[in-house]
Image (tube, rainbow, N blue to C red):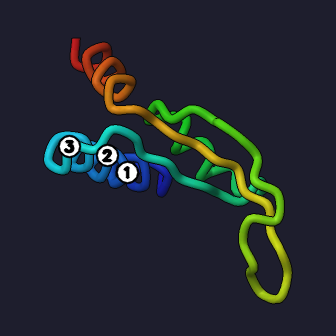
Amino acid sequence: MGQEYATEAVKAIISFSFQELDLHRLFATCHPENIASARVMQKIGMQQEGYLREHHWIKGEWRDSWLYAILEHEWRGVNIIRNS
């Protein structure tokens, strides 16, 4: 249930970023064990681009991250399909 709120919030941020800020590309990272965050990114059309080893120093240790991204034209394509 909470995942739907996260998905809607991320959709609003991405929409604003592409429509109002005229950005070309957005990216995000998440911890490999954070399956819920990875699902939200996949659900909104982001693609997994890579695995960043020892990307963040958190709580006294280096942590890995998954890298996800979406391009403006990919986002528009996903929205055209969803709004049809």
Residue at screen point 46% across, 30% down: 45
Residue at screen point 32% across, 18% down: 77
- What's the amino acid at mark 3? Asp
Reply above or below: 20 against 72. Answer: below
Find residue 11 and report its horizontal and vertical position in percent: 33, 44
Callout 1 crowding tier (Cα within 10 Å): few <14, some 14–19, many ≥20: some
- Look at the numbered discs 1 and 2 and tell me whether their residues touch, using CB distance below 8 Å: yes
Disc 2: which residue: 14
Disc 1: which residue: 10
- In the shown orientation, is residue 76 left or right of residue 3? left
Dot 1 or dot 3, earlier in sequence: 1
Reply above or below: 39 against 78. Answer: below
**SS for callout 2:** helix
- Number of disc labels: 3
Residue at screen point 72% across, 72% down: 56
Disc 3: which residue: 22
Find residue 72 and report its horizontal and vertical position in percent: 33, 32
Q: CA distance from mark 1 to mark 2?
A: 6 Å
Callout 3 crowding tier (Cα within 10 Å): few <14, some 14–19, many ≥20: few
- In the shown orientation, is residue 70 left or right of residue 39? left
